[in-house]
Each structure stands twice: as C-alpha cells, then as structure tokens.
Image: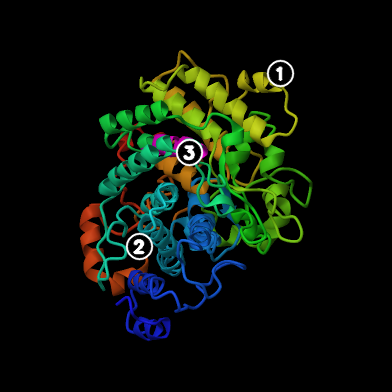
Amino acid sequence: MLSLKFKKMKEILKHYKSPVMVALLLFISAFIGCTDKFDELNTPENQLPEEEINSATVGQAFGYAQYYGLGATYVQVQENLHAHLFAQYFTTNVATFSTERYVPNGTWVDLFWKEFYTKPALMQFTTEQVTKANNMVLANAIAKVWRVVIYHRMTDYFGPVIYSKFGNQQTSVAFDSQKDIYYDFFKTLDEAVEVFKQNPSGNAFGTYDQVYAGSAAKWLKFAGSLRLRLAMRLAYADGPKAKAEAEKAIADGVILTNAENAGVLSTLNSTNILSRITYLVNDFRANSSMLSVLKGYNDPRLSIYYSPAATGGQYAGLRNGLAAADRGAVVAPTTSFVGPQWIGNPPRPGTVNPTLVLTASEVAFLRAEGALRNWNMGTGTAQSFYNSGISLSLTQNVTGITNTQITAYQNTLTTPVPLADKWNSPAMSNIPVLYNLAGSFEQQLEQIITQKWLAIYPDGYEAWAERRRTGYPRGYALIGSDNPDLSATDLARRVIYAPSEVTTNRDAYQAALGLLGGADNMKTRVWWDQKPLSAYPTPTN
C-alpha cells in the first residue's frame, strides 16, 4: 500500500464513499517515497502546497489541525446553527433554518462530519504518526493534547463517534462509546503531561503552533485545565472518576492568568472563527436570555458582546423557537448583532481577535464548582474561585476596568430583568451576582454556571454542553418546537448522525446506536448527561 502514487490513490477513492476511508487513503498517500508528491489538501494559503508531510513539514499539518479542527470551515452550520442556538447565545432570524425549532438538518451535519474526518482529523492523525515515527517526543505530546480538544467537541455533539479505529484501513470503521473515549482522553493527557514535566523549558513546532508557539510549560498548564474541564463533565456520570481527575489536574497545574489563555492565533490564514461568518452573513441576532441577564446585572460586557440595534440604537434580542413569520430580514435592524470585535478588521475580519479555546476564567469557575462539591481544588473556596472567575472575565473583556468596578459588580444584588418584547418575556432567572453562601447546592451551582456562561461567550460548544450537564443557565423556553420528541421547554441533548455515515458505514452506525443507548434523535442523552431530569430547572416561559 505504501508504494501507491497519489494519482492512483485518487482512482481508488472513487470506489469508496465513506469519509473515514477517504481520510485513511489520503493519509497513506502522505507516507509514500520522498520523491512522490500529493495534491493540495484544500489547505489555507501557504500551507502544504503539493508537499509531503514529514518531519520538516509536519508543523504545517499541525497548524491545519489546530484551526480547522475547531470547525472553521463550516462554522455556520456546525456551531452557529446548533450549539449557539442551544446555548442561547444567539437566535437565527432566517425563516427556513429548522434547528431554531429543534428540527434536525442532515445536510448540514453531513457537511461538517465529512469535513472533520477527511481534513482536520486526517491532519491530526498524520501529525501524531509523523512525530512518533521521527521520535519528536515533545511535538507528539502537544499533538496528543490537541486530539483531545477536537475530539471532545465531536463526542459531546454526537455521543459515540469514530475515534480509536480511525485509520484502520477498513471500509467499515467502528465507533467508540463516549465513556471509552473520555477514559482514553485522560490516558492521553497522562502521557502528554509526563513528557511536558520532563521537558519544562522545551519547545516544539515553534510558530506553527498557533496556540502557545510550542512552549511545553504552557502546554502543561493547558493540559491540566483541559483535564479539569473534562473531569467536571463526568460529575453526574462517574463521580469518583471526576473527582480524581479534577484533583489530578490541580496538582499538575492549571491556567491561572489571562496571559495564559489558550486561543488559536488569528492571522490572514486563520482569522477568528466567528468572524468568518459575520464577515459574510447577518442572519443571527442576540439571544433574549443573554440580554435579560446582562441588562439586569448592568454588565459592562453587554457592549462588548453585542452591538446596538441599527434601528433605535438599543440592545434587543430574540427568543429561540420563533415561528417563520416572526423571523426574516425585517427583524434584523431592530435587534442586536455581535460586538465589533467579531465583525471584522480589514484586510480580513478578526485578524487581531484569537479564537479562544480555554481561559483562566473558565478554570476558576470549574474550581468553584469543584470546591462546591468538596473536591480539593487548591487554596480557595467556591466563593473565592467564583469571584476570581468574574474578575478574570471582566479583565479579559473590558479594557481599563478597575478593581473598584469589579468589586462592585461582584456585589451586585440586582437580578435579570423582564424584556419589553412581543412575548412579554419575564426575567430569565432570579439570581443576583453576589454569591449566596447561605444558598442550597443548586442555587450556588446556578450562580457559578450562569457566570461561567457569560464568561465563555461565544464558545457555543462548551456553553451547550454545560447547559445539558447542569440545566443552567435555565434560559427561556422556546416559543415553539416542531420536533415531536422535544417540547418547547425541553433542551436539545445531541446532534443527529450524518446521513452519509448511516448509509456508507451502516453496520458501524447500528452498533453505535447500541453504544448510545437510544434513538438517533435530538432527545437521546449522551453518556455524561446523567443529572436526573427531575433536578433540572424549568426554563422560563
């Protein structure tokens, strides 16, 4: 197989429809003799034009996996029309976009499923193989951590996905259970952390690493922070494992300052991911849940996160689940779009604003929840970590904010406000910013997750995952649902599988449904989503 030329490889590809098999064969073509070239893999400008991936060029492959592994190509259908809506960061104002009312769109899912497995997953796989074969130990460890980043988004979307069997040279590729995938994530992080600890001043990939420019010390803290995020995801599914991994994360070290935040550098070739669509489309608006909270708290991030409406100059949003008649271009001028930093800077949008992956404020809120659960999160309490998360987020987002202003916000007793909209929407919730030490576990958890939701905007992947895991923020009920499996007060629990995978990898798909433990619909819960439904708050009507 390794002697196949790429021209021959393209002929073979015609006989396989499975995206994973296509990715595998493309991968094999990358390892042919040093005098053989392969066609450009739809890479950004200046990345891998007709070159093989080897020890000299593997950094370019990794840079591709970093940026496109976050869903850059199809960000609109992948994140904006799924997680952004379900997290209640945005509402689409296009009448025909069905996910707004919980109706799945298989064509959209096909786009980003195929894209992931034929391009960034391939580049990720190739990077790990090349760095291992060439004894590039530190580079291999960094690549392993990034595999966890991009695959945890996939499994959180779908549940069981193709993971350990990717690249198995079979026409049918099996899915892994989400539990097995998560457990392998922790094993993978263990392997990487050991390398980082042995090379504290080491560097790999250099500037090809668009997150930390190859710094082993920074990747060590990122690995710990990522472990903490994933450990918390298991809080209701496997409490002992969650606690052990979270405490291990703190012992290894986590991100503590905004200077250590992890984000993919925004350049001409990897512009901020949200800016990729705001530059071209104007078909989503601020969500009412965010506006109820931000206005109620007099939150200084309101003018950072959203822009005033073109008509009237006010900050106004939309509820999710609007009927088609209540959407359309007519509502756009009267409602808020994203803030200026995501709208663009010539010559390309977002060339200054990085695509954030994990921040110090998120870590602080994770530690706050861990402390609330009586886990060892280091020196501090649930309240002190909570306040630290607020401070870090405000400092990160609001230029020139003072300590006095931060303290005043942390002591805010005002609550989310009703909205003067068509639906007479009441306040989204009744919690203040000031931490309620006398409150119940659920009341304190709601405060922690609500502030985390505000802090990690616009990361729809993480915000939707946390809404599913905890029920917070409670959000508004949809105005209406067209999905018979989900009512307007239900929360979408997952994304359906790609129809192309159902038809071309059918045996594996059927087995995946057994691992999922339910039907392939938006109601079935993924493995870690195990908080009793009776403990969930009811969304506000």
The residue that label 1 is drawn on is: 404
In the image, is residue 256 part of the stretch drawn in magenta? no
Q: Which mark is residue 222?
A: 3
Which amino acid, mark 3? Phe
Q: Which mark is residue 344?
A: none
The alpha-carbon separation of the residues under discs 3 and 2 comes to: 30 Å
Q: Position of residue 413 (x, y in %)?
A: 61, 19
Q: Which mark is residue 497?
A: 2
For the point 57% across and 66% down, which residue is it? Answer: 47
The reply, left or right, for residue 30 in relation to residue 258 is left
Hey, which quadrant is residue 366 in on the image? top left
In primary-sequence order, the first of circles 3 and 2 is: 3
- Say if mark 3 contacts mark 2, CB within 8 Å: no
Instruction: Reply above or below: 142 against 444.
Output: below
Q: Position of residue 288 (x, y in %)?
A: 60, 43
Which amino acid, mark 1? Thr
User: Judging from the image, what secondary structure is the residue with disc 2 in?
Assistant: loop
Which amino acid, mark 2? Tyr
Span of residues in magenta? 216-230
Residue nearest the observer in this picture, 287 or 19: 19
Residue nearest the observer in this picture, 389 or 64: 64
User: Judging from the image, what secondary structure is the residue with disc 1 in?
Assistant: helix
